Amino acid sequence: MTYRAPVSDYQFILDQIVDFSAVLESAAFEDIDAETVAAILEEAGKLASDVVAPLNRGSDLTPGNLVDGVVKTSPGFASAHGQIAEGGWIGMLAQPENGGMGLPLSVATAINEMMSGGCLSLSLQPLMTQGQIEALEHHASDAIKALYIPKLISGEWTGTMNLTESCAGSDVGALRTKAERNGDGTYAITGQKIFITWGDNDFSDNVCHLVLARLPDGVPGTKGISLFMVPKFLPDADGNPGVRNGVKVVSLEHKLGIHGSPTCVMEYEGATGWLVGAEHQGMKCMFTMMNNARLGVGVQGVGVAEAATQKALAYAQDRVQGRSPIGTENGAIIDHADVRRMLAHMRADTFTARAIALACGVALDLGRTDPEQQARGAFLIPIAKAFSTDIGHEVAQLGVQVHGGMGYIEETGAAQYARDARITSIYEGTNGIQAMDFVGRKLMDGGEAGFAILDEIESFAEAARATLPKRAIAVWNAAETLREGMEAMLALPMNDRFAGAVPFLRAFARVLGGHYHLKAAIAEGGEGPRSRLAAFYIKRMLPEHAALLAQVRLGAADIYALSPEDLSA
Ligand SMILES: Cc1cc2nc3c(=O)[nH]c(=O)nc-3n(C[C@H](O)[C@H](O)[C@H](O)COP(=O)(O)OP(=O)(O)OC[C@H]3O[C@@H](n4cnc5c(N)ncnc54)[C@H](O)[C@@H]3O)c2cc1C
């Protein structure tokens, strides 16, 4: 069973759940219509299913490898990357005047999900380049834009993001990489970056590193950091790759998963760099692209969850053990209540995470011109990143369980999904950091963006009472409990908020899930597969919000009451 991109589900969510039509009606996207979007999703779905997905297993078995200082990539990656570039998918978010497709973020989010579901390791390469293009569009000089963006979009050159150092992970401000003015407008970059995704490859003519470093007069912390473009080969007078720059891959990390994605230790020794944005404004530049990057990682979780669900479902329909408890002739394990429960859980949460991500994409698309939607998008980002990636590995773990012993055996590929998904909760800001952002910065408006979402959930549930009274009342009640939980959260000092941040974020996602499942059921007229899935979610999964919210009120005292000595007892 190989992955098939769930194009009809994206279409359903866009049409029925997240009001994508408002994006098409907005001034920013007046050149794109619904038929074009449908055709784009179909086309991307074929690429993800037929070209990208077949490489997934092989890339796990034959990881990228460092040979004479160059990363030799997994079999088939060069050709597939070429096809991704040819289709224009690397530049799908780039502005049309720069040669991009200028697609709405909501559509790109669906496409990024399907590429991740096909092969997470390969999909990371175009995603990194996508992020770099966005940073350059917003902050680079015209000369840098003109030279780099077309080559990045065409896939001739590829991009990376270099933030992390051994002393600077979550705390980016602790970085030690130095930048010195060369006196000719360029800078000399010296230092070591670790964990750099796709830090090198054997299929692009140049690898362009966006590097955070500190100038001699940069103050300590995040405020003293600047952003630089540091290419592997210095462009010559004609803009072609010229002499080698002072940057190299020192080694590749050996990882739990995403074996096909080369994770590099990069050494910069007086490498020539060009400033992107103003001096000391590097973090501000990174923040511009943070929302898209986090949403891009969020749907990596959803993509893997989808792929794991498809695989587990196929296995459960084929594997026979014992007699069917519901009397199906030759009943397979899917007839056992516990197996059916696991599969329903997988499908229900994959839908929830997908709907949250697409709702977030729509809000950010509308937010280009509407500040309220901008605030909503920003509010949803930590949920879209953290919940979706947590769901990615939870669903993948259930996928292993559905397979039984064969799930633990690598050849089925179920274990690969569980290994691959694990990183998504860690990079691009760990999920703990996302949750702190959620209860800290994202509640600085006094909860306005969050309460507005709860108002909408409640008024939709009220209207849905006529068709699905029990489900609608359960969702309304859950939204009300969440409202009380949010009020309690807002009354707490910051470190007490942080102690309950992860459960609070998940509770919010659970209630959003109730809302989106209810909407799906109503769109179907209250009967059918989506309505049955909604009933499962609302009865069995939504109630989790209450237990999660109970933790919010506890603050931090009982956690700190446990000393390190207590924990080692
Ligand atoms: C496979 C892989 C690919 C990566 N790709 C890239 C890349 O392309 N470019 C790049 O720059 N980086 C990349 N990273 C780095 C990644 O973003 C970091 O690993 C991540 O940000 C966490 O930093 P850390 O590993 O130093 O963990 P730490 O910051 O040491 O965190 C350890 C734990 O402490 C918690 N913690 C830390 N600070 C706080 C705090 N203030 N409050 C509460 N809890 C806290 C964290 O949530 C975590 O649970 C990659 C990492 C991996 C493993």
Image: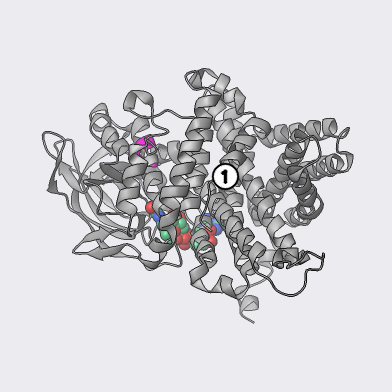
Q: Which residue is situated farthest in the bottom direction here?
A: 569
Residue 291 visible in the snapshot? no
**Residue 133 drawn in magenta:** yes
Q: Which residue is situated farthest in the front direction here?
A: 329
What residue type is disc 1 on? Pro
Residue at the location (64% across, 82% down)?
Answer: 569
Residue at the location (32% across, 55% down)?
Answer: 176
Residue at the location (83% across, 30% down)?
Answer: 463
**Residue 206 drawn in magenta:** no
Q: Which is nearer the eye, 350 or 336? A: 336
Q: Position of residue 389 (x, y in %)?
A: 56, 53
Q: Which is nearer the eye, 259 or 311? A: 311
The residue stretch that appears in magenta: 131-135
- Relative horizontal placement of residue 28, taking residue 401 as reference (left or right): left
Determine which residue is flagged by label 1. 6
> Which quarter of the picture shows residue 238?
top left
Q: Position of residue 84 (x, y in %)?
A: 37, 42
Residue 144 visible in the snapshot? yes
Residue 241 vs 387, above or below: the answer is above
- Relative horizontal placement of residue 483, taking residue 241 as reference (left or right): right
* Total residue callouts: 1
- Relative horizontal placement of residue 443, taking residue 123 as reference (left or right): right
